[in-house]
Amino acid sequence: ILSRQSFLCGEQFTEADIRFLPTALRFDGVYAPLFKAGGAHVRIRDFQNIHAWLKRCWEIEGVKESIDLKDANESYYKQLFPLNPGGIIPTSVSAEEIGLK
């Protein structure tokens, strides 16, 4: 979908994009290491279209100010005790590391 259009539902930023954004932002910092999601990463462009979409979303006024990426990542490690019994919380992936300004 994102190889053919700017946003999930076409050329307009919609609620679908808003709902997918936290998941996409957490992928490198949480899903890839915690759920062993195949070793792929958004930040090193394994998902080029998602990375380009993230950059477009990040530039929309109010988006980056409304998301606490560090908290979004850390909350997974704190809440999913069976997957993280040691309670170890790795350093969060920053927006800059994902390639966002």
Image: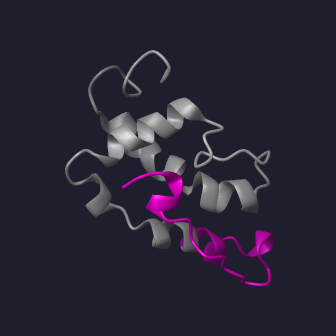
* Quarter occupied by residue 36: bottom right
Residue 44 at what x, y percent from top left? Answer: 62, 46
Residue occupying the far top of the picture: 4
Residue 52 in the image: above or below residue 70 = above
Residue 61 locus on image (x, y percent):
19, 49
Q: Residue at x 47, y 51 (%)?
A: 99
Place residue 53 in its image quadrant. Answer: top left
The vertical placement of 7 against 43, above or below, is: above
Residue at image position (39%, 42%) is: 55
The quarter of the picture where residue 5 lies is top left
Query: Is residue 20 one of those drawn in magenta?
Result: no
In the rendered view, does 77 fall on the left or right side of 95?
Answer: right
Q: Position of residue 92 (x, y in %)?
A: 57, 71
Q: Is residue 75 left or right of residue 4?
A: right
Asked whether 94 or 63 is in front, the reply is 94
In the rendered structure, which segment of residues is drawn in magenta?
75-101
Is 100 one of the magenta-colored residues? yes
User: Residue at the spot x=66%, y=76% of the render?
Assistant: 90
Q: Position of residue 96 (x, y in %)?
A: 45, 60
Residue at 43% from the left image edge and 42% from the top image edge: 54
Residue found at the far left of this picture: 61
Q: How many numbered marks does the figure carry?
A: 0
**Relative to the observer, which residue lies in front, 76 or 67?**
67
Q: Quadrant of the C terminus?
A: bottom left
- The coloring applied to the image is one colour
Depicted 3 relative to depicted 48: above or below = above
